[in-house]
Image: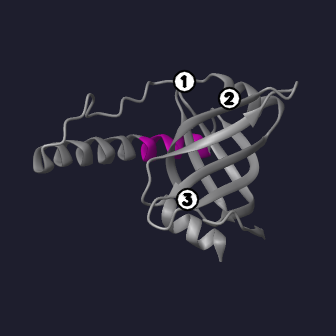
Amino acid sequence: MIAKRVAELLKEREFISVATCDFNGRPNAAPKFILKIEDNLIFLVDYTIGNTWENLRVNPKASLSFMDTDTLHGYQINGKAEVMESGTEYEKLIKEVLQRQVDLSTKRIIEGVTKGKVHENFELAIPKKFVVFKIKIEECVEIGTSGGLKREKL
């Protein structure tokens, strides 16, 4: 039930915070571009190829988090990541990344024109070199407004 709510909320978002740790336990948290949610998988794009990428290569555990600003409930998604940099599935995902890039840029331009909203950058620029993180969801946690936790193992 929590996982279903998480999937619904994430379909409305472009970015999510991803926390990882390196081999020595040094933490790193960074926003990542949400490509898609499919079954119990979340596909994220990383185009900086920095600490998150390095950490997941030595420790595939990741924790993702975001807030539902309507209900003020927080959500945490814990799982195991696969770093995708090549291969058949990666090649298919490239097309989806490019389409999401166009969709998000178009949305930002329309929002700027119709609402008079000023954006420093309208286009999401994804460099030619990027990786996709395929996160297999193992657990979803809902954090209520009073601090209560509900956990759901998948």
Q: Crowdedness of circle 2 by 10 Å Cα count: few (<14), some, many (20+)?
A: many
Q: Amino acid at mark 1?
A: Thr
Q: Crowdedness of circle 1 by 10 Å Cα count: few (<14), some, many (20+)?
A: some
Q: Which residue is mark 3?
A: 37
Q: Is residue 46 left or right of residue 51?
A: left
Element type at mark 2: helix
Residues shaded magenta: 89-97
Q: CA distance from mark 2 to mark 1?
A: 9 Å
Q: Quadrant of residue 18?
A: top right
| Label 3 vs 1, first from the N-terminus | 3
Q: Which residue is mark 1?
A: 48
Vertical side of 133 occupied by 70: above or below: below
Residue 53: give its label: 2
Q: Amino acid at mark 3?
A: Ile
- Across and down, in percent, residue 112 comes to 17, 43
Residue 66: give its label: none
Contact, mark 2 vs mark 1 (Cβ under 8 Å): yes
Where does the N terminus fall, quadrant-wise? bottom right
Q: CA distance from mark 3 to mark 1?
A: 21 Å
- Of residue 56 and residue 153, the one placed in the foreground of this image is 153
